[in-house]
Image (cartoon, rainbow, N blue to C red):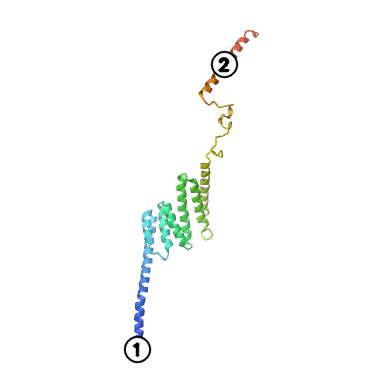
Amino acid sequence: MARAQATEDSRRMARILRIASIPLVLALGALAVKLIAMAVIGALALSAYNDGDYEKSAEYATWNLTANIIEPHKAHFGLGTAYLGSLLFQDARDELEMALETAPLPDACAVRLNLSYAIEGLGDNADAAGEFEKAAQLYQEAITVLAEGAESCPPSDERQDDLQQKLEQAQQNAQDQQDPQGGQGGQPPPPGSGDDAEGDEPIDNLQDLLDAAEKDKEENDAADRAYDNLDDFAPKPW
């Protein structure tokens, strides 16, 4: 009798365990489906990007943002990279910065590289608009993004050199914009330092020009009369 009761208790416990495990099995099944779907969507996003269809790539990448608790940085990286291909630099920067917050190595290196391109694009836009100080600030931020990963990521010396050249040019343009006279602070050049330095005083108006011409005429007439008078007493050479 006791043995029969023990057998019944064991069966009852087994049924309870099977019922209790159903949610876990369903959760694991859903997770597996989610992971498979993420892989498929990621492949579609990459294919669209390689085809130059950045808008479609961004659409696919957006799908992976939903309930992505395994590798959330990959969805933000994919979306940010798609925005970068579409030249939507601010949107790209926002997504890539979110990706960088959770990206482990070595994925963080790729995120940093693309983030530097997004910030550089913003700098190029500012430079084209004549906002040279803003452009210089953005180029510096792009350099900093790469420099902060220098110890863990592959060397990016050539990339940083390109950004450094843009930074220096933007700084020079900003300086020239603030001081267009090349050091005079917007003040006119001192007297005698320009093209008028060859003469005593510049002729500023038409009346001065006429007075100078009349004076020259009178001097020439006087010289002619003096040479004419010399004929009256100078000996002839013949």
Mark 1: which amino acid?
Gln
Query: Disc 1 vs disc 2: Cβ atoms closer than 8 Å?
Result: no
Query: Quick one: quadrant of the C terminus?
Result: top right
Please indicate whether residue 133 sits to the left or right of residue 65 in the image.
Answer: right
Relative height, residue 213 to residue 97 (above, below): above
Please tell me which residue lies in front, 75 or 36: 75
Query: Quick one: quadrant of the N terminus?
Result: bottom left
Could you tell me which secondary element the residue under label 2 belongs to?
helix
Where does residue 191 sit, x and y in percent of width and height?
58, 31
Q: Of label 1 and label 2, which has the lower sequence position?
A: 1
Instruction: Determine which of the numbered discs, if any, sits on residue 142 in the image.
Output: none
In this view, the residue farthest toward the bottom is 1
Relative height, residue 188 to residue 61 (above, below): above
Q: Quadrant of residue 41?
A: bottom left
The residue identified by callout 2 is: 218
At 39% from the left and 56% from the top, the residue drawn is 49
Q: Quadrant of residue 63?
A: bottom left
At 47% from the left and 56% from the top, the residue drawn is 113
Relative height, residue 17 to residue 48 (above, below): below
Relative height, residue 40 to residue 237 (above, below): below
The residue identified by callout 1 is: 5
Mark 2: which amino acid?
Glu
For marks 1 and 2, give the CA distance.
146 Å
Q: Residues within 10 Å of mark 2 (few under 14, many from 20)?
A: few
Where does residue 134 sit, x and y in percent of width and height?
48, 48
Residue 30 in sight here: yes
Q: Residues within 10 Å of mark 1 (few under 14, many from 20)?
A: few
